Image (tube, rainbow, N blue to C red):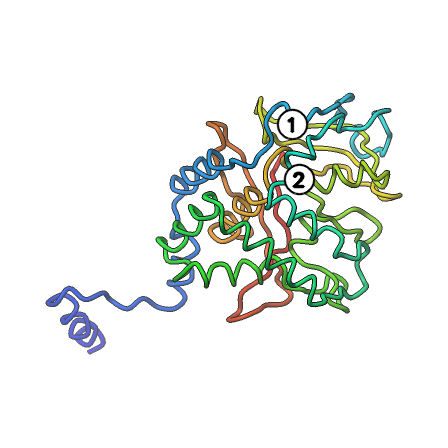
């Protein structure tokens, strides 16, 4: 009897070419994997080539000094007597609108977790201003069009609204006050349980080193790129706190990092995501924050970074 019922239910679909309804659980799985691996690598190349605000080779001079072995990275030893950044063309790079708006966000956070983040109207306006500039770029336009075409979003407005919430929405890392966000963790960095947590952005690294708040210790990975952006694995001490491996792009624009991380977060959450940049592959890791949600069960960004 059940077989006959199913056949009768499917008959109109077979005759008129209508789509067979998909169970909700299947829809969720299909949405996550609506973008194929090939499409992700293709789009990542487009994002890479569209990053017109990235640093030129002459805009940044690095002084890498000592390459630490795997047995040395956890020691906290300062193998570099000089700063990592010998030169950054601030007048050129930081005058660009997305960089300027990004920099304005970096003084909005309490570094040590456990204290509630206050987000006054002025800081909300800074978040909006940053995203407004980012969404003016060709790079973000390509990502927006792709995600809409694959069914992840219905419009630019819906994507922009969700992006703001996933990155800037607050949650607690200490089972108490709302003390963290994806943006703070990945782009600014935090001190959590006595260690540096997150901290995957080169502009923040440069500014903290310049101000004397951060000490570069050594590097353990230098990616295969010969121009910027490149990818590095670094050992750093921020104030008195240590991070034995902080992986990050150096020389990229804020919009590129936000776009490439968001691409992987939306299409490959909690998984390794393979991208292609200038013909060279790289894996990014994203994590969702599982302890709280927003909207219809959506999850905030917990972390996102290049795997080195």
Badge 2 crowding class, 10 Å Cα cut-off, few under 14, some 14 to 19, many 20 or more, is: some
Identify the disc placed on residue 73: none
Identity of the residue drawn at 54% across and 42% down: 256
Residue 306 pos. (x, y %): 60, 39
Q: Seen in the image, is 18 located left or right of residue 34?
A: left
Q: Is residue 39 above or below residue 110?
A: above
Task: From the top left corner, tell me how far across and down residue 140 is, in percent.
Answer: 48, 47
Real-space CA distance between mark 2 and mark 1, rounded to the nearest whole angstrom: 11 Å
Q: Do the residues labelled 2 and 1 touch (CB within 8 Å)?
A: no
Estimate the x, y position of residue 216 in percent, counting from the top left: 80, 32
Residue position for label 2 = 94
- In terms of secondary structure, where does tag 1 sit? helix
Q: Single out the residue that lies furthest toward the right.
A: 240
Q: Where does the N terminus fall, quadrant-wise?
A: bottom left
> Dividing the picture into quarters, in which one does residue 184 lie?
bottom right
Q: Residue at x 39, y 68 (%)?
A: 24
Which mark is on residue 59?
Answer: 1
Q: Is 111 or 171 nearer to us in this picture?
A: 111
Q: What element carries label 2?
A: loop
Q: Which residue is drawn at 39% across and 51% down?
A: 145
Q: Which one is nearer the viewer's eye here, 129 or 4?
A: 129
Residue 163 image offset from top left, x and y in percent = 54, 58
Disc nearer the start of the sequence (2/1): 1
Mark 1, other Cα within 10 Å: few <14 / some 14–19 / many ≥20: some
């Amino acid at each position: 009897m059940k077989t006959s019922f199913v056949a009768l239910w499917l008959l109109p679909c077979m005759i008129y070419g209508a789509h067979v309804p998909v169970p909700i659980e299947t829809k969720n799985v299909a949405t996550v994997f609506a973008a194929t691996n090939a499409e992700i690598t293709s789009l990542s190349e487009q994002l890479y080539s569209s990053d017109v605000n990235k640093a030129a080779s002459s805009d940044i001079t690095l002084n890498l000094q000592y390459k630490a072995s795997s047995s040395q990275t956890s020691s906290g030893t300062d193998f570099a007597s000089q700063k990592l950044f010998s030169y950054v063309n601030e007048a050129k790079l930081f005058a660009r609108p997305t960089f300027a708006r990004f920099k304005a966000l970096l003084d909005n956070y309490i570094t040590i977790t456990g204290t509630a983040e206050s987000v006054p109207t002025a800081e909300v306006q800074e978040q909006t201003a940053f995203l407004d500039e980012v969404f003016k770029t060709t790079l973000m336009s390509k990502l927006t069009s792709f995600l809409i075409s694959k069914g992840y979003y219905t419009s630019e407005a819906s994507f922009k609204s969700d992006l703001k919430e996933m990155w800037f929405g607050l949650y607690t890392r200490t089972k108490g006050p709302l003390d963290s966000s994806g943006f703070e963790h990945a782009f600014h960095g935090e001190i959590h349980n006595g260690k540096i947590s997150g901290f995957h952005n080169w502009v923040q690294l440069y500014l903290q080193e310049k101000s004397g708040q951060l000490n570069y210790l050594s590097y353990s990975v230098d990616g295969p790129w010969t121009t910027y952006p490149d990818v590095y694995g670094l050992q750093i001490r921020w104030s008195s706190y240590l991070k034995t491996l902080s992986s990050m792009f150096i020389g990229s624009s804020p919009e590129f990092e936000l776009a490439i991380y968001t691409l992987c977060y939306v299409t490959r959450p909690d998984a390794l995501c393979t991208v292609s940049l200038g013909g060279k592959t790289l894996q990014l890791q994203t994590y969702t924050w599982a302890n709280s949600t927003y909207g219809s069960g959506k999850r905030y960004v917990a972390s996102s970074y290049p795997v080195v």
